[in-house]
Amino acid sequence: MRNKGLSRKTVLAKLGKIQRQDLKYEDGKILCSMCTTPHPAARSAHQLFLSSNLGDAGLFPGSLRLEKEVINNLSALLNGKDSVGFLVSGGTEANLLALWAARNRANVSKPEVILPESAHFSFTKICDLLRLKAVYASLDSSYRVDPSSVEKSINKNTVALVGTAGTAEIGVIDPIDKLSEIASDHRVHLHVDAAFGGLIIPFLKEIDCNTADFDFRLEGVKSVTVDPHKMGMTTIPAGGILFRDDSYLDCVKTETPYLTEEFQYTFVGTRTGASAAATYAVFESLGREGFRNTIARCMKLTKLLSSSLEALSFKLVSQPTLNIVAFRSLNSKLLSEKLRERGWLVSYVPRLDCIRIVVMPHLRRRHLAAFLKDLSEIAEPKIE
Ligand code: PLP
């Protein structure tokens, strides 16, 4: 640290210069992120609640009320009549809390969790932290987890099954209804990782896309991750964890002897109330109608992109379910590198040897048109 401080103006000028190294969603070149430009109301709300700490909520009852409002909104969206939950640092912490609760509730000596091969990598960290054995279930030809593979893997040590509603790689939705039946039959916790899809699928249903149930409507579903800092268009950090009812809270409860509240239920201690305010602001500003319209626009662009790629003879990994397009060329890795050289930030997915594009709200038709033009100019053999 420097010995003598600088003026605010000088510090901000330095920051402005450094910030120019960061990419901006608005430039339309970021095609690989599940986050996006925060809604303007979220920015203002975040600023207003900068000093609020939900880790010591007795000091910030207003912020706590906002968190409850957000959780109630998410519960209503996901049909959780009695569900309870928290805003946390992201999908990783939300998934951690779910498996922490499931493991403690089951209380077996050698706990195991059954994950789809397509599960998000956060579960690798979580299994290590919680000393859970990860047992991977295979996928079917449409990259969804195969329920029979899940059922075959269940044994007396199984503390939870996980299904994903919107995989990070290609956005497919596992057959949560089948997993729910299996979970109920074997009396085991089913956690749904809807970190990305949780704020999309309920609106897709409203805009006439035929998507199956994935939420608390299904009896076996005991917890759901749903992240406002992805398609919820709020500021980072805002992950969400919902439990079916408050009986799960005892399993993740820690006494907090010197704070204003007796217990904490999240992994992170000090926790910003700004995210709760920002998420509340987005929900209030957009309402269901605003979300529906934004998702309809993203899906329209997704369809446009996928059909244009097919017209250019690229092969889709599967028809998009959500606003993610995954496609292959003869050498997808090389193509992704060439695209990056031209400034297009796409992901290369080694597991599926494909390129992945997430059509987030910051992307416009003109961005995709420019991308497709560059793509067609890159001399790259296409798959027949
Ligand atoms: N689960 C899924 C399905 C995700 O897509 C992601 C992130 O993309 C996560 C979990 C982890 O979320 P975070 O990066 O907010 O911790």
Image (cartoon, grey):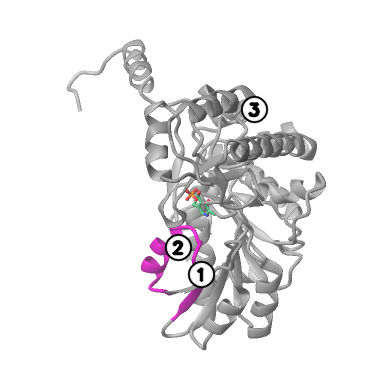
Instruction: Please give the residue where the numbered disc 1 appears in the rendered image.
Output: 115
Percent position of residue 55, x then y:
49, 49
* Left or right: where 374 falls relative to 86: left
Instruction: Please give the residue where the numbered disc 2 appears in the rendered image.
Output: 123
For the point 42% across and 74% down, the residue is 132
Please name the amino acid that badge 3 sits on: Ala
User: Callout 1: 10 Å neighbours few (<14), some, many (20+)?
Assistant: many
Question: Does the beta carbon at disc 2 come under 8 Å from ligand 1?
Answer: no
For residue 41, the mark is: 3
- Tell me how far mark 2 sits from mark 1, CA to CA: 8 Å
Q: Marks 2 and 3: which is nearer the front?
A: 2
Who is closer to the viewer here, 73 or 124? 124
Q: Marks 2 and 1: which is nearer the front?
A: 1
For the point 53% across and 57% down, the residue is 94
Who is closer to the viewer here, 228 or 178? 178
Please name the amino acid that badge 2 sits on: Phe
User: Callout 2: 10 Å neighbours few (<14), some, many (20+)?
Assistant: some
- Tell me how far mark 2 sits from mark 3, CA to CA: 33 Å
Percent position of residue 383, x then y:
50, 46
First along the sequence among labels 1 and 3: 3
Q: Are marks 2 and 3 in contact (CB under 8 Å)?
A: no
Residue sticking out furthest to the left? 3
